[in-house]
Amino acid sequence: MQKLKHTLYIFGAMLFLNVAFAQAQQDTTKNTDPSLNGQYNFMLSKSKSLYGARLINPSRLSGLWKSVNDTLRKERKQLQEAKQEIKTQADNIVSLKGEVTGKESSLANANASVNEIKFLGISFNKGTYNTIVWAIIIVLAAALAFIVFQSGKYRHEATYRTQLYQEVADEFQAHKVKAKDKEMKLARELQDERNKWDDARGR
């Protein structure tokens, strides 16, 4: 009798499981959330309780496991792609840093070349060269101003000396004229005296 009850219990349980699994298979397509969490909750909602245990449809469990594996493979593939993308971006960053460093070096050389001036085979910084040139210009301008000032002074002195010489020359010429007139007067007087003396002897 006890054995018969046990057999009936097992048969009833199997019948209940078959009915539950059949009903669960009919409701499988009603899941509207395809995510893992949605499939898990849908599987739990469609499971039956038997003496405190959950009876789950193996097809749903297999589908959930397949979805988990597919999701893991997809995530691993995306992770690998992300790592490859990160590596590519890192290589690009290193390459760009190298290009930037090269361009900065070229720019520095170009600036140094622009700011460098060669004069008489000697390299000068542009600022230093400009300072030297302006210093030379200022010195030359000062020398020119001094020369012009001295030239004016010498010209004034030369004019004064010329006028003084002209005055002396005029005085000498006047003295010469006076001396000549005096000489001619003395000559005439001497001739008159000679004429008088000849007349006196002739008598």
Image (cartoon, grey):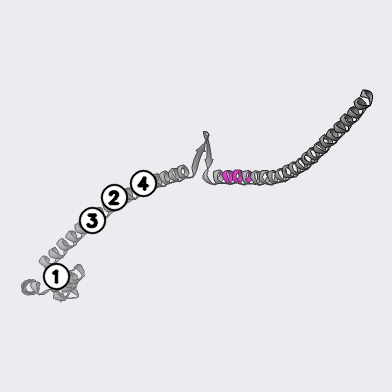
Q: Amino acid at mark 3?
A: Arg
Q: Amino acid at mark 2?
A: Thr
Between 200 and 34, the one lying in front of the other is 200
Residue at image mark 4 = 99
The numbered mark, 3 or 4, whose residue comes first in the sequence reads 3
Q: Residues within 10 Å of mark 4 (few under 14, many from 20)?
A: few
Where does the image place residue 24, in percent across and percent down from the top left? 9, 73
Per the model, the C-alpha gap separating discs 4 and 2 is 16 Å
Q: Amino acid at mark 1?
A: Ile
Q: Main secondary structure of the magenta part?
A: helix
The numbered mark, 1 or 3, whose residue comes first in the sequence reads 1
Q: Residues within 10 Å of mark 3 (few under 14, many from 20)?
A: few
Residue at x 78% of width, y 43% of height = 167
Helix or strand or loop: what does disc 2 sit on? helix
Per the model, the C-alpha gap separating discs 3 and 4 is 34 Å
Residue at image mark 3 = 76
Residue at image mark 2 = 88
Q: Amino acid at mark 4?
A: Glu
